[in-house]
Amino acid sequence: MNAVEKVGILGGTFNPVHVGHLILARDAMEAHGLSRVLFIPCARPAHKPETGVEPAAQRLAMLERAVVDDPAFEISRVELEREGVSYAVDTVKALRAHAPDVDWHFIIGADTLPELPTWRNILELIELCRFITMRRPGMPDREALTEGVRLPAPWPERLTEGIFDGHLIDISSSEIRKRVAQGRSIRYLVPRDVEDYIADQKLYRTKEKL
């Protein structure tokens, strides 16, 4: 009997994608035995302001450049093709409909855990996929993180059962946008091809893009 394939889902605006995203995906793969990770750029973020978000085509182009050399990293356009506000529960439903035999794992950082009760149909989402949560060094332990999830039992435990310790990579897309607007280097914060694309397209040069 063939083993069920375990696939990770890493969603985001990727505005821009940076090395922290790539390291998170690789850490999750190794910690939970995933065969591959789908990077899913959103059409319209559900939990972030849309101001300053580059067009989908440019965010997708940067993501394609970032993952091209890793055969375990793939891109799904499911949210871009659906358009509208991107809700995780709709995305996972679509993925399960397309590949019902896959064991889907939703990858997040531990700092996202307290926000999950505000996600659309979060209890349904927990039933549709497993959650993989990266705990950075210095963050609270699993018990404390579980207590911070304001949902009735047993859902907090379900959300935190996949916690693993990942690398401490303190990089954010907002920091990168700010550095570009200030004329500072982003070398080593993003893949070289992404850095070149940002320069060629003159992205994030104005304060409005912060």
Image (cartoon, grey):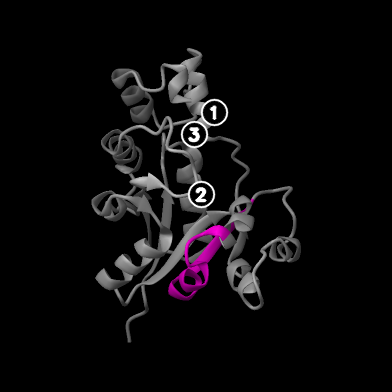
Please state the horizontal and vertical placement of residue 179, each as a whole percent of the image.
51, 20
Q: CA distance from mark 3 to mark 2?
A: 14 Å
Position of residue 65 relative to residue 32, above or below, is above
Q: In terms of secondary structure, where does tag 3 sit?
A: helix
Question: Where 196 falls versus 113 (above or below)?
Answer: above
Circle 2: residue type: Leu
- The answer to whether 85 appears left or right of 49 in the picture is left
Q: In terms of depth relative to the viewer, which is nearer, 128 or 8?
A: 128
Mark 2: few/some/many CA within 10 Å (<14, 14-19, 20+): many
The label nearer to you, 1 versus 2, is: 1
- Give the magenta range: 118-135
Q: Is any part of residue 26 visible from this angle?
A: yes
Which residue is at a point 42% across and 51% down the rendered structure image?
Answer: 11
Q: Which residue is mark 2?
A: 24
Question: Do labels 3 and 2 touch, CB within 8 Å?
Answer: no
**What is the spatial separation of the Cα atoms under label 1 and label 2, in whole angstroms?**
17 Å
Does label 1 or label 2 sit earlier along the sequence? 2
Q: Nearer the viewer, residue 98 or 70?
A: 98
| C-alpha span from label 3 to label 1 | 5 Å
Disc 1 target residue:
175
Q: Amino acid at mark 3?
A: Ser
Q: Which mark is residue 173?
A: 3
Q: Nearer the viewer, residue 151 or 41?
A: 151
Badge 1: how crowded within 10 Å, few (<14), some, or many (20+)?
Answer: some
Q: Nearer the viewer, residue 134 or 209?
A: 209
Question: Residue 156, position in %: x, y?
Answer: 64, 70
Q: Residue at x 49, y 30 (%)?
A: 189
Image point (37%, 45%), residue name: 44
Circles 3 and 1, Cβ within 8 Å, touching? The answer is: yes
